[in-house]
Amino acid sequence: MADNQEPATGNERTHHRRVMLIAIVTIALLLTGMIWVARLIVEQQKLERCLATGQRDCLRIETPQSEPLAAGGQSEKKHAD
């Protein structure tokens, strides 16, 4: 069989490059998402194992830092009354 295809024009090459770039970006995003989900699953499994053993300090809870209270129980900020 003889190959009767004409050489690709500049417009076709640009289109093919664009399609390949979109495919590569899509695959990269899918891989990133899969890694993120896998890490979430591993963290959940660790938490479940810890809770199953009866431990109470399995999950670290972040608390916001508050201002220290003055001796009178009021904050150190002065209020204009």
Image (cartoon, grey):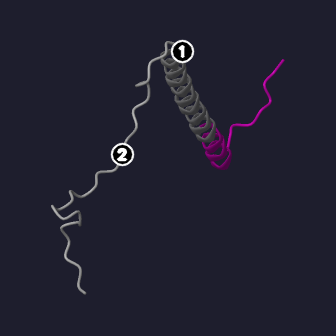
Among the two numbered marks 2 and 1 on one chain, the one whose residue lies closer to the N terminus: 1
Check if mark 2's residue and mark 1's residue have beta carbons within 8 Å: no
5 vs 76, nearest the viewer = 76
**Left/right of residue 50 with respect to residue 77 in the rendered view:** right
- Residue furthest to the left in view is 71
In which quarter of the view is residue 78 placed? bottom left
Tell me if residue 14 is in the magenta stretch.
yes
Location of residue 40 with respect to 68 vertically, above or below: above
* Residue at point 53%, 26% (across, down): 35
Region rendered in magenta: 1-20
Q: Secondary structure at mark 1?
A: helix
Location of residue 71 with respect to 13 vertically, above or below: below
70 vs 61, nearest the viewer = 70
54 vs 40, nearest the viewer = 54
* Residue at point 17%, 62% (across, down): 70
Amino acid type, label 1:
Ala
Say few, some or many: other residues with alpha carbon within 10 Å of mark 2 (under 14 / 14 to 19 / 20 or more): few
Picture disc at residue 52? 1
In which quarter of the view is residue 25 placed? top right
Location of residue 39 with respect to 11 vertically, above or below: above
Q: Give residue 3's position: percent from left, percent from top.
A: 78, 25
Amino acid type, label 2:
Thr
Q: Quadrant of the C terminus?
A: bottom left
54 vs 15, nearest the viewer = 54
Picture disc at residue 79? none
Q: CA distance from mark 2 to mark 1?
A: 25 Å
